[in-house]
Amino acid sequence: MKLPVSLCMIVNNEQKFIKDCLDSVKEFVSEIVIGDTGSTDMTESIAREHGATVFRMDWKNDFGDARNSVLERASMPYIFVMDADERLNQSSSDQLMKFFEYETINPGRVVIKNIVHDNDITFGQATRIFPNLPDYRYNGRIHEQLQYQGNTPKSSQTNIIIDHLGYKDEIMIERQKIQRNLTILTEMEKSSPHDLYVIYQIGKTQFVAKNYPEAVRYLEKVLKSIPLNSLTSSTYASSAWLTLCYSLYYMKSFSHLNKYIEEGIEIFSDYTDLYFIYGLSLTSMNHPDAIKMVPSVFNYCLQLGEADSTKYETTMGVGSYKAHYNLGVYWEIIGEIDKAYSHYLFAVQQGYQIAGARLKLLSR
């Protein structure tokens, strides 16, 4: 069934990805409008074979401007925005149809399922479905944000999931995304030095680049600038907090890290990922008092369960198989093999194959 939706995309040299992207959604949308910013491969011909209207556009180092140019050519009552390295999750076709069962003027927020290094999975969210009205336009040269009449629109949470492949290490390197993003973000910082969202994105990008001291510098600046009573309502404070903690963890700055963890779990008390990084830090500190606390922290992760992906950026497994795996490591180290085996087995049963290697070693 075709929905009253225009799929809107911007692309550049996406021949590896665009077919699977369009195949995942083409039976549901009435129109596909694609702005090509300079592809030299087969992207355009593949898109046209899938029924897309493709037009060439000059690239101005501005993703918001590019997206708006595509929106202006859409003719359906609703817009659905995707990127070529994304696919509509197979489980979400019914949810997409359900969104349009009731006439709504509210935009729809979707869950972004990111496939990252070592096939880890993280979750975020973004507003990707909205009425085709000129009041809805994107703002920002990179990590562009949808706005309604210049403000962040109030959107409804959907159960639609979009699979995103673009954060895999090999894809990031091939596309030189990190350096491109940092170049644009640095230029934005020069023109808007007090824009906390830009500073946050620089910190996140420095983290992806493994430049952890710079990530800490930028993310601390963000968190120190947001009033304490506004942290839980901020759309990115919890993510900034977690990324800062992981940066400090990789720097082995444990005293600094534990300070932020203690503060963070007071503010974001149901954020399983913060407790998980706490367990990792206790394991790595190599101090008897810290080691004793490890099982209680990872067991609390299991008690909390997976973090709410509509509320937090989160990594799959922190409230299930990854917590079990780390409990297995703990009990194996201290010689309680039966307990270790039990936790590894739970992790394997939940699909965490790394734990299978530990099970085989324990079974010898």
Image: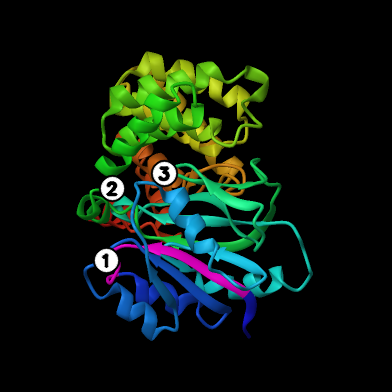
| Mark number, residue 218 | none
- Would you say residue 10 sits in the magenta stretch? yes
Image coordinates of residue 23 in percent, x first then y, are 43, 79
Please name the residue that numbered disc 2 is placed on: 177
| Mark number, residue 142 | 3
Kind of element beneath mark 1: loop
Image coordinates of residue 274 in percent, x first then y, are 50, 32
Identify the mark nearer the N-term, 3 or 1: 1
Kind of element beneath mark 2: helix
Q: Gap in Å between the C-alphas at discs 3 and 1? A: 19 Å
Image coordinates of residue 184 in percent, x first then y, are 34, 38
Q: Amino acid at mark 1?
A: Ser
Q: Which residue is rendered at x = 49% and y = 32% of the image?
A: 197
Q: Residue 189, located in which quarter of the rendered image?
A: top left
| Mark number, residue 39 | 1
Instruction: State the quadrant of the C terminus.
Output: bottom left
